[in-house]
Image (spheres, grey):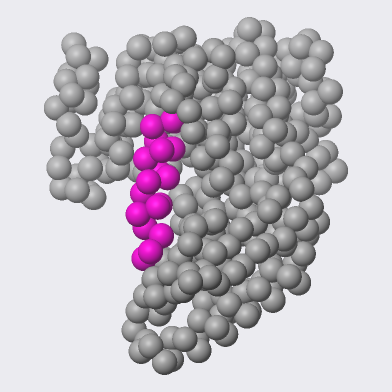
Amino acid sequence: MLKAIIVDNEEPAINVLKILLERTRQVTVTNSFLSAADALAGLKKAKPDVAFLDIEMPETNGLELAVNILAIYSDVEIIFVTAYDQYALNAFRVNALDYLLKPISFEDIEQTVDRFIKRKVLLAGSNHRLPGNGRIYCFGKFSVYGAENKQPVKWRTSKAEELFAYMLQNLEKEVPKWKICEALWPEYDQEKVDIQLHTTIYKMKKVLSSAGINFNFSFINGCYWMSLPQVYVDTVEFDSQTAFSVPVEEGTIEKYEKALLLYKGDYLEDNDYLWSLPQKEAYFKKYYKLATSIVIYYMQRNDYIAAEKILGEILEKSPLNEAAHEMLLKCYFVKRDQVAFITHYQVVQELFKAELGIKPSKSIQALYNSIQL
């Protein structure tokens, strides 16, 4: 049974939602709160799987509350329940699972609970217990975990971390020594760079060994080579899940959604390694192609909530992505949600003017003109 909390400053609204949720027989409402402050105070005791939040509340609104909840428990799913639809994009920017408009029907709740259960299964699949030889995450913050360690390893030097990231990008490939030196120490002369490389290799291997990470590192014919037997690497998993050119359809959607969940941020996004930029761009293109294919799949099935959520995630990573903005506007257009459409169009118009000094594309303007007629 899933544990839920409800936060709404109107008690009748809480009572109605509680009845609908418990009618599904899959959710139990363990706590309800009339203010954001009370919810935060009772959060540690409640330990919910999901939080249903009103947005328009005095003092602290639901969007701010969601950020505070996720700072305490990052695994809590957020679902907004509100009478106002102008907050949709902001809701998805805090990674909300759903956005329900009052008055809520039982069918709305059933669909949301079903989506939540499906997402839990996908997350469980992508975060299953991994082999005890370590795990590595390159999407978002670069993090390396040793066997059974809950905290990422601490690198002795930034160059030791960078060398490992570089060899990881070239996993199980022969990499010439000169190429490594040119990437990591372009300003050093040959004599000094040899000393730096050998010292950095020693420190890198020391950190990996201390963390219990299984690795092979060798030097043959002027080339270095590294492998990580049975170590989980999110980029390797992502490549594996997206290796086949099978279309997104009913039989593959679950697999591709699982792959999409792996992309938690851009490749090595907090590290400004010049040598990683082409790979960063390549991974984003692969992610974007997959994400838009899934959006089209949902739009064809009239599941605009799921489509809007993924588009919100794309725009969080790429705010100036004109194609994604246009797809989101088309979702609002098809739903005949004029308020959300106009609100988002104005956001796009202001963003493009401020950042690029241009107007939205002619196709976006044409879509706007058609909804104004």
Does the rendering let one see residue 37?
no
Would you say residue 287 sits in the magenta stretch? yes
Quarter location, residue 77:
top right
- The answer to whether residue 17 is left or right of residue 225 is right
Question: Is residue 56 or residue 256 the one in the foreground?
Answer: 256
Q: Residue at x 53, y 70 (%)?
A: 220
The percent position of residue 167, horizontal first and vertical second, equals 52, 63
In front here: 152 or 207?
207
Q: In the rendering, at what x and y percent does residue 325 appear?
A: 32, 31
Among all residues in the image, which is located at the extreme front?
Answer: 221
| Drawn side of residue 70 relative to residue 315, left or right | right
Can you say which quadrant of the picture contains the C terminus? top left
Residue at 55%, 37% in the rendered image:
240
Q: State whether the magenta stretch is mostly helix, strand or loop.
A: helix
How many numbered discs sit on the rendered protein?
0
Quadrant (top left, top right, bottom left, bottom right) of the N terminus: top right
Q: What residue do we see at 15% from left, 42% from top? A: 358
Judge whether 370 appears above or below 207 on screen. above
* Residue range corresponding to the magenta coloring: 274-291
User: Would residue 100 appear left or right of 12 to someone viewing this image?
Assistant: left
From what the image shows, is residue 184 above or below residue 17? below
Q: Is residue 261 visible?
A: yes
Q: Residue at x 76, y 29 (%)?
A: 4
Q: Is residue 31 located in the magenta-colored stretch of the structure?
A: no
**In terms of image quadrants, where is residue 368?**
top left
Examine the rendered structure and indicate whether residue 159 appears above or below residue 337: below
Image location (x, y in percent) of residue 348: 28, 36
Where's residue 180, x and y in %?
Answer: 43, 72
Occupied quadrant, residue 23: top right
Residue nearest the viewer, comparing 224 with 169: 224
